[in-house]
Image (cartoon, grey):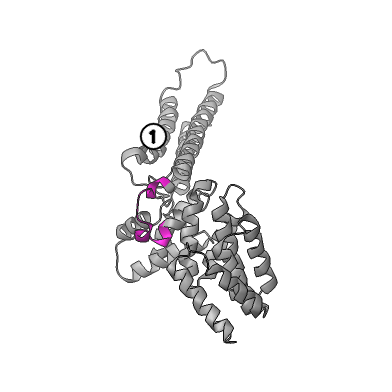
Amino acid sequence: MSERIRNVATVIVIAVMAIALVLLTSTQPADVDRVEQIGLRIKCPVCQGESIANSPSPMAEDMMDLVSERVAAGVSDQGIIDELLGSYTGAVLLDPPASGSTLALWLAPMVALALGVGVILWWQRHPGSDTHDPAPPVERSRTRLLTGGVVLILAFAGIVVVASNSLQDRPAEAAGAAALEGQDLSEVSNETMEAVVAANADNPEVNGMRLALAERYFEVGDYRSAFPHYLLVAEDPEATAGEAVTALVRLGWMAYDGNGEVETATRLVDEALAIDPRSTVALYVRARLRWCGAGETDQAIETFEGLLTDPGLDPETAAGIEADLELARDGGECP
């Protein structure tokens, strides 16, 4: 093989590897619109290394809707990214800026490429440096070229591993229930609470926040969003008795009010009463199911009357029971 051919082969190998490095480390396709470009840069808080543009999760869809709204409003890319990272705990950049702790991730591919090119060029310029090698010059040249390529490949492989771990496993600073400890949850958005709950899904201490979030959805009639949170608490063996009772009662009422499933609703509330037979909320809902669902008005009236004898009954609940009791006595329909 002539010197010219070897040089051309060297240039081709270097060019191919340089292109591969650029393609594999790039995170933004050029043929996508601005909304998707931004979505591809944000890691979904509840997914495993997926961007919000590629994730089918409801939270990711909500985040993409927010991106669309902000783009339409003329907000800058950085402004939108800052809002997402600030509003959704657990969201992180999939393409971190080339500064601070992420600078090495941006410099590493260039360093690896320069190292491999340097090795190949040095061997090309010093063909007699390994005079003790008994192999013919052509074979030595091929070996040098191959060795340089291997250096590039191994270096790039190491970069991919390090970058993947850094980008996918790096926790957000505020991820975790402790991030909201001591804060007034009424001032925390549903999105932030969703992200915190998702980031601490295996921690039983997050059940309180999960129930608080579910109650928000329940109170506005958003049963679809409330249901999975109540269900997870109800099925959690480490949930406290109070948490389990609340979740079961809410699930029972949603089964009746949302789908008209009287038997399912009654079974769930009975499970709550098996945990705490004196639970006021469980007894009240059980009575309403008798009245509204089963037509057992007399039994419901009896339960309402018994609940009103409790001196510890809070005024709001007492007012609701009194209104139901009066309506049931008058033969009215369940509201």
Q: Is residue 185 magenta?
A: yes
Indicate the position of residue 179 as horizontal and vertical percent values: 38, 47
Question: What crowding class fits label 1: few (fewer than 14 Cα within 10 Å), some (14-19), or many (20 or more)?
Answer: some
Q: Quadrant of the C terminus?
A: bottom right
Q: Residue at x 40, y 30 (%)?
A: 118
- Secondary structure beneath disc 1? helix
From the viewer's perspective, is 110 left or right of 45?
A: left
| 124 up-or-down from 156: above or below | above
Most foreground residue, 328 or 85: 328
- Pointer 1 residue: 111
Residue numbers of the magenta segment: 178-192
Most foreground residue, 179 or 158: 179
Q: Amino acid at mark 1?
A: Val
Q: Residue at x 64, y 80 (%)?
A: 297
User: What is the count of numbered marks?
Assistant: 1
Indicate the position of residue 49 as horizontal and vertical percent values: 50, 49
Residue 108 placement: quadrant? top left
Q: Is residue 230 magenta?
A: no
